[in-house]
Image (spheres, rainbow, N blue to C red):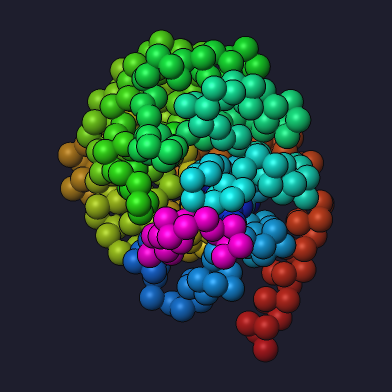
Amino acid sequence: MKDGKFVLDAHTGFWDASKENIKNEYGLAFAETFYAFQTGFNPPDPKWTMDFDKEFRKVDPDWYLHHMFVRGEMDMAILSTQVLMDFYHTGFTNSKRNAEMVARAPERLIGLGGVDPRDKNATRHMREQVEQDGMKGFKWYTAEWRGESRGWKANDPAVFPCYEEAIAMGVKNMHFHKGPAVEPLSMEKFDVYDIDEPSSLYPELNFIVDHIGLPRLDEFCWIAARSTNVYASLAVANAFIHKRPRYFGEMMANLLFWLGEDRIIWGTDFPIWYPHWILDEFMEYQIPDDIADEFGVQLTPEIKAKIIGGNVARLYGIDTDAKLKKIENDEFSQRRKEFLANKASYVGA
């Protein structure tokens, strides 16, 4: 918990960009772009910097769990997917690895599946990932390469069977990367416009737009204003909070004005960034007065509680009070108590 509030990090990764898994220079470029995001947005304190080869390229499960639930104040987290089979032998992430990670902390982690809708067996793979791997939602990466194809669109009728398969399985949450491009993928293929049509055609589904469509925030807001099943995930956007706090305030004001406080979702993109400093700064953050007055919005502690956990918990059917009670004395809670006790002893020495 953070300040007594339930926290669910809706955008984290358990990836493998190791030398053994990379197929070509594109796989390395993809991981290096992620690392450049970290070095570009991090606070200057060196404790928030990861070593590219030792820590960043391949996520160690124990390291992830420690920083998320022991050193970190998250109660739960969602494991994202980027398949990227043209760049990596077993994918950057995949449902099998996510399932193995979820098994380490089943009360704490939610796994997302990922398929390429251009694959003729996409719907079969979706069902396997739900029934065999226990995935609770899907992450879609519209700029992914596949042979000669350099991307696909969420409103292509050829993709609609995937949405219909999700509905048939009772899987409601569709997470889409709609934000900055990652080398060598095309920013154009991450355009947010293609969310407009399927979000209207499939009101049974929730379309969670990771990275709030940046740099197309205006377009995203206009789409979300008319489609109440479109949600804004703050991953990447909230990394601006340290170095460009006013810009972050403008983004938050737009989201609160257009979508309201119930459709904004927390995500840190860990392990691109450590989750601690982003959460700390968000809980202390206030939208500048002139921006808040212009938009007629505010960012109260009650609204922050919805954003950092309550909103996405609702989408996944999580009773936050029951969940907190269930995990209050689990392995990670016990380890966190020990961590805090040792930290206090060290600080006071």
User: Percent position (x, y) of residue 74?
Assistant: 61, 52
Q: Is residue 55 above or below residue 272?
A: below
Q: Which residues are magenta?
A: 17-36
Q: Foreground residue, 166 or 16?
A: 16
Specify the principal SS of the magenta part. helix
Q: Is residue 322 above or below residue 46?
A: above
Q: Quarter-wise, where is residue 143 in the image?
A: top left
- In the picture, measured across the screen, residue 205 lies left or right of residue 168, that is left
Indicate whether residue 60 is drawn in magenta: no
User: Percent position (x, y) of residue 76?
Assistant: 65, 45
User: Percent position (x, y) of residue 94?
Assistant: 62, 43
User: Percent position (x, y) of residue 171?
Assistant: 61, 22
- In the picture, measured across the screen, residue 299 lies left or right of residue 292, that is right
- In the picture, measured across the screen, residue 128 lies left or right of residue 291, that is right
Could you tell me if residue 127 is visible in this image?
A: yes
Could you tell me if residue 315 is visible in this image?
A: no
